[in-house]
Image (spheres, rainbow, N blue to C red):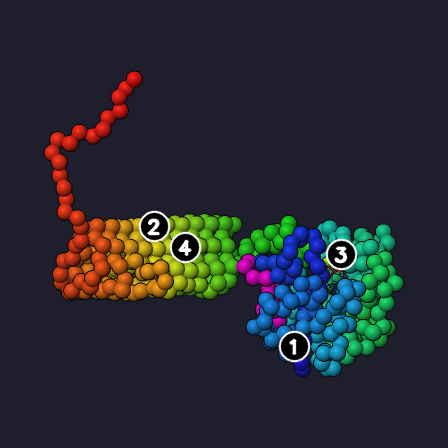
Amino acid sequence: MSTSVIILAAGKGTRMRSSLPKVLQPLAGRPLLGHVIETAKKLKADHIITIYGHGGDRVQQAFAQDQIEWVEQAEQLGTGHAVQMTLPVLPKAGMSLILSGDVPCVSVDTLERLLSASNETGIGLVTLTLDNAAGYGRIVRKNDQIQAIVEHKDANEEQRQIKEINTGIYCVSNAKLQQWLPQLDNNNAQGEYYLTDIVAMALKDNLSIASVQPNMAFEVEGVNDRIQLAALEREFQNFQAQQLMQQGVHLIDPKRFDLRGQLKVGQDVCIDINVIIEGDCEFGDGVQIGAGCVIKNTRIAAGTQVKPYSIFDHAIVGERAEIGPFSRLRPGAELSDEVHIGNFVEVKNTRIGTGSKANHFTYLGDAEIGIDSNIGAGTITCNYDGAFKHKTVIGNQVFIGSNSSLVAPISIGHGATVGAGSVITQNVEDGSLAFERAKQMSKANYQRPQKVKK
Ligand code: UD1
Ligand code: MG
């Protein structure tokens, strides 16, 4: 049977006070709507239909890579009106899950349970019991059976005492949506076409209404303002941190850990506080990440130690390497095993062979470095001539003396030595020593200028 996912995303999100449409606001580094689309994909939905309104172009652009059917709701006349807009493209048969673009955390498991419960009845919803239910639509039951959803603004005093709320997540047969939606009216406190009125229509058709509860309350939390966004971010981060700890990761403090993407881990990975991990990352067995690191789309192999405040972006690091503190690995940094990169060393588009070291104040860009070479403090690969980038090739067992400039294109042969303070502009042969310095001048008994004390 075909499953469609309908996502309501036409709201303006006035309370965010942002030029960005609400459903594009990021949670854990991904737009709110992106989370919902990801969930729809995991459910293997046959159709993902998204209803857009405000900022439609930007919203569609943000998901240009995804297979989405976009439906416009030019005027926001209510949730029922929004779903009505999908009827021309909705398959005639099958079931639809109806989700909100601003409720990003609903889980695949909860939705699968909703789908199977609703399959039997033709309609079901996700409900939740809250201590403070103010503002939400209330679930009215008689003998346990759902009788109605009453919006807070339409509810009487007795109904407002009800703690079971409508989360705004539904599953309905497409045939029934085709039948019911055209019958909605807007005779209510808000003058809107309420999607929730389909409950009364289902009862008229003698259907019973299935309901399921989410595994965790934060799954159904919506985002209307930045305070709710920040609160949900923490809850989501806490959830991810717990999953990682269950996989055996040692998080020194899960409250000070942020994952904005995916992290694959081996055994006994230890992550100190205030680390941010973005995109797709992978840490092998025993990898240790020091405090304050920012690591994006990077693979770090087993046994490597990363000291505090190091920054990685699209880098690959081998086994038993030592990185940091204060290292910066940029796109195309590929480090073999046992490489050491120390403080204030920047590596970009550079491969470094096993056991090589650059421990202090260095820029390595567009370079290839062999094995067991030592790059002295303050070495710079001068890769840019103002217009073009050029390559530096450094062989095995090379020693580059401190404060040297290697002006690319250039090649330093195996076993070569470069004297400290050199500006090297010509290739250096295997095994040779190259240095380039002004001759040292000395003046005996030199008297420095002195201030005259008044
Ligand atoms: C809705 C439910 C309420 C439920 C609550 C859960 C109705 C009538 N009420 O109320 O029972 O407790 O959600 O959060 O459905 N939207 C559109 N087009 C519109 C109106 C809304 O796309 O014309 C989108 C919004 O952007 C939002 C979602 O639908 O993503 C829910 O709309 P909202 O106005 O927040 O509904 P509530 O009044 O909160
Ligand atoms: Mg709402």
Type of residue at label 2?
A: Phe
> At 33% from the left edge and 50% from the top edge, which residue is drawn?
343
At numbered mark 3, what does the secondary structure look like: helix, strand or loop? loop
Which quadrant of the picture is home to ligand 1?
A: bottom right
Label located before the other in sequence (2 or 4): 4
Q: Is residue 66 magenta?
A: no
Q: Nearer the viewer, mark 3 or mark 4?
A: 4
On residue 344, which mark appears?
2
Residue bearing mark 4:
311
Q: Nearer the viewer, mark 2 or mark 1?
A: 2
Q: Nearer the viewer, mark 3 or mark 2?
A: 2
Q: Nearer the viewer, mark 2 or mark 4?
A: 2
> At 65% from the left edge and 60% from the top edge, which residue is drawn?
21
**Other-residue count near label 3 (Cα within 10 Å), few / some / many at <14 / 14–19 / ≥20:** many
Task: Decide: is 451 above or below 68.
Answer: above
Quick check: 251 left or right of 335? right
How far separated are the C-alphas under marks 3 and 2? 53 Å
Label located before the other in sequence (1 or 4): 1
How far separated are the C-alphas under marks 1 and 4? 40 Å
Residue bearing mark 1:
47
Label located before the other in sequence (3 or 2): 3
Task: Decide: is 396 above or below 70.
Answer: above
On the image, which quarter does residue 447 sit in?
Answer: top left
| Rendering coords of residue 375 (x, y %) | 24, 56
In this view of the protein, which residue sits in the foreground, 30 or 425?
Answer: 425
